Amino acid sequence: MSLQMTLGFVLLMMIVLWFSFFMIYSFTSEVFVSRYFQEVRRSLSVGPMMRGPVVGHGQMARRVVPDLFISFNNEIIQNPDMIDPPEFREGSTIIRSNTSSYLLFGFRDDDSALLLGLKMSEFDIYLSSLRSVMIVAFILAITATTGLAILLGKRISRPLKETSKMLQQLMVSDLSQRLLTRGSSLEVNRLHESINDALSKIEDGYKRQQQFSSDVAHEIRSPLTSIMGFSRLILRWGADDPRVVKEAASNILKTSQSLLGISEALMFLSMADQHVDIKTTDLKKLVDEAAEPFARYAYSQIEVDVPSVEVTTDETLFGIVLSNLLDNATKHSRRGPVLVKWFGETGELVIVDSAPRIPDKERERIFDRFYRSDQTTDLNGYGLGLSLVRKICDVIGLTVRVGPADGPGNRFVLGGLN
């Protein structure tokens, strides 16, 4: 990287210097040409001379300086340097002859054509010296630029090399390392901040993966063990007792459905980003659809006090939240009533159960994965429902909290609906 930066910087400076020297050389040439032109104009008055060949020839012979090349109507009148006769061209022209430069001026009046030329000795000497000086200056400038570019390249690439070395030494097992964001240039600090942000996301994803693998290994062991046990029961006793087959198959189906629910919940909880389809929908419709399956169970008593009001949310994800909260409420209420009520003033949907009150120290922990209170160890469940509720609420921009009800039971509050 340092070599590339040095070569790039040197190439850029070569282009800048070449352009600058070219402009200086061109400007100097124009200044000299203008100077010689003015000298010719002072040496010879063109206007009176061009009124006729004879008169012009006489005046020219008396007034011109000896150094001028003069050609009148293609007839060479004076050629002090013995140059090859050039063709007539109107206006100014620079030619090279006998290793010297000549400035020619052509004038035309009626049928007369006058060509004047002047040797530009000072022009050649000065431009030759200027070229030599420019070549030396160019070599010195490129040498100094190369040295400066090498120093700057090393200084700039040093933190980048250190960053690269640190990233190469980074171990997957330890993603907590971060780059320092002080002591370097602003651009390098921004690069380090971007890399640190990326490392944080990678670390978070790696921890999610580890957590997911651990959760799966932990939670599917019991259902799989149950399925294996009932399968062996069928193999051993199924041929002699059809009731054993029916009971075992029923338990296998129930355990498989539970295992499927665990897998889906774990998959959702392990995802860093979920697709959200936010749109306006009827809250009463969502609550009725979520409560309808629980009406089939004799132990559930769900009372819905929700008007037909429009809210903006994701129908599918919000339905999962309601289903898990209602399942949690009916399961822990032990045949007691469950109330679902809408408070339009605060934009909150409240679910009040008849379960034993959750202790203050456990109110936040019940939203952790696989956490189960000592009061619920006799109930079926894996401690994933409420953690799924919290995760989905974070995704769709809602809040969920729990507190004691006005009477017996607990009060789960969904906030942020609008």
Image (cartoon, rainbow, N blue to C red):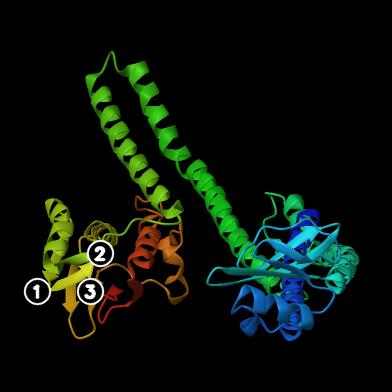
As shown in the figure, which amino acid type bears the numbered disc 2? Answer: Ile
Specify whether 182 is left or right of 254.
right
Tell me the distance, in whole angstroms, between the alpha carbons under discs 1 and 2.
21 Å
Q: Nearer the viewer, residue 58 or 200?
A: 58
- Tell me which numbered mark, 1 or 3, is placed earlier along the sequence: 1
Q: Which mark is residue 307?
A: 1
Circles 1 and 3, Cβ within 8 Å, touching? The answer is no
Specify whether 51 is left or right of 35.
left
Element on which disc 3 rests: strand
- Tell me which numbered mark, 1 or 2, is placed earlier along the sequence: 2
Which quadrant of the structure image shows residue 203?
Answer: bottom right
Q: Which mark is residue 278?
A: 2
Location of mark 3 (residue): 349
Q: Quadrant of the N terminus?
A: bottom right
Q: Residue at x 33, y 21 (%)?
A: 234
Specify whether 198 is left or right of 315.
right
Which quadrant of the structure image shows residue 260?
Answer: top left
* Dot 2 alpha-carbon crowd within 10 angstroms: few under 14, some 14 to 19, many 20 or more: some
Asked if 393 appears above or below 275 in the picture, the reply is below
Q: Position of residue 418 (x, y in %)?
A: 22, 76
Element on which disc 2 rests: loop
Q: Nearer the viewer, residue 86 or 196?
A: 86
